Image (cartoon, grey):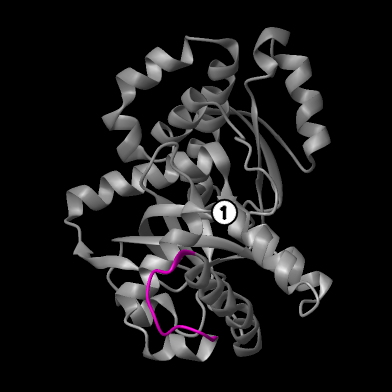
Amino acid sequence: MQLSQPEADHFFRLYKPLLVYTNQKLTVTKGLEKPEDLENCPMEKIGQIRNKLYQNPELFDDFVQEKKKELSPEEIAIIQSWKKFIQGRFYLFRYLKKYTVFLSVEKPHKAYGVFSLYTSFQEMFGPQVPRLVETVLLPFKGQIVSDGLFQGGNISFGSGYRSSIKEIYEEAQARFGMITSLEQAIEPLETVEGAKLKTYLKNERNREKYWEEIEYLKEKSPELKQIYYQEIGKAYAKKQSKILREIGLKNVWFAWYEFLPIASGQTRADVERTVKQILPLKHQKFVYFFHLKGR
């Protein structure tokens, strides 16, 4: 997914003068007096100017201060929000309809939903992902964009490495969710161990591969044990849902305790009442409630 052309135009109307301003202050290259001069500037030099900008983030405020009469309040807010930039290496992981997933290489791993500018990432890098790229992510009008400058992108990965990257993505999703805005601080949704446990339990392959780690983690704390029962219940409910539909069930609620369905009913409230009647109190928090929807 990419920005609309008017939005991309707006981005560059702010970003290009900022690069020119940076060069004027730090003199990376000569002959760069106005944004149009960037068209004839070697990409290597533009990259050096951009790196100088992020090494000296006070330039964002200095630029706004000098140009505030030329900028609207919205544009001032946009430029100042760029101080929340994220510069680094990313796995260009997956193309989705809404955005492209960038997965940070550095720990803690995070997954970002990123918009391209004039050209889609798939056009730039081809259909085969993941690929390793180095770029800068910026907030822009409630979304995340790259700044349009990349290093790398030529390296592809074999099936074994792709599988490892997929596990990193699943753990990032479990710990932070999909990050689609940089406007607010990024807070973890789950602990490191909780995210690992959710990743290990996500599919049958992971459960087989990491079963010893699963057994170890689930006994470390009551919180991890609850994650285990919830996630294993979810996995087995999903696995059995096809069979349940084949026998004609639909719009039915189930209570799943680890590998087994222990109650069912037409509403969640019905099932919750049954669980309270049949299951000892100390086990009730481990129940996963599953809605088998009609199709």
65 or 43: nearer the viewer: 65
Which of the 4 image quadrants contains residue 204? Answer: top left
Question: What secondary structure is marked by label 1?
Answer: loop
User: For the point 34% across and 20% down, which residue is it?
Assistant: 213
State yes or no: residue 33 in magenta: yes
State yes or no: residue 160 in magenta: no
Which of the 4 image quadrants contains residue 145? Answer: bottom right
Q: Estimate the x, y position of residue 101 in percent, counting from the top left.
A: 46, 61
Q: Estimate the x, y position of residue 99 in percent, counting from the top left.
A: 53, 69
The answer to whether residue 180 is seen in the rendering is no
Q: Estimate the x, y position of residue 205 in percent, counting from the top left.
A: 30, 39
User: For the point 39% across and 74% down, which residue is it?
Assistant: 46
- Name the side, left or right, on which 33 lies relative to 285: left
- Name the side, left or right, on which 114 lies relative to 73: left
**Residue marked by disc 1:** 57
Q: Is residue 41 above or below residue 153?
A: below
Q: Estimate the x, y position of residue 77 in percent, counting from the top left.
A: 75, 64
- Please provide the residue range marked out in magenta: 26-34
Q: Is residue 113 above or below residue 70?
A: above
Q: Is residue 136 above or below residue 34?
A: above
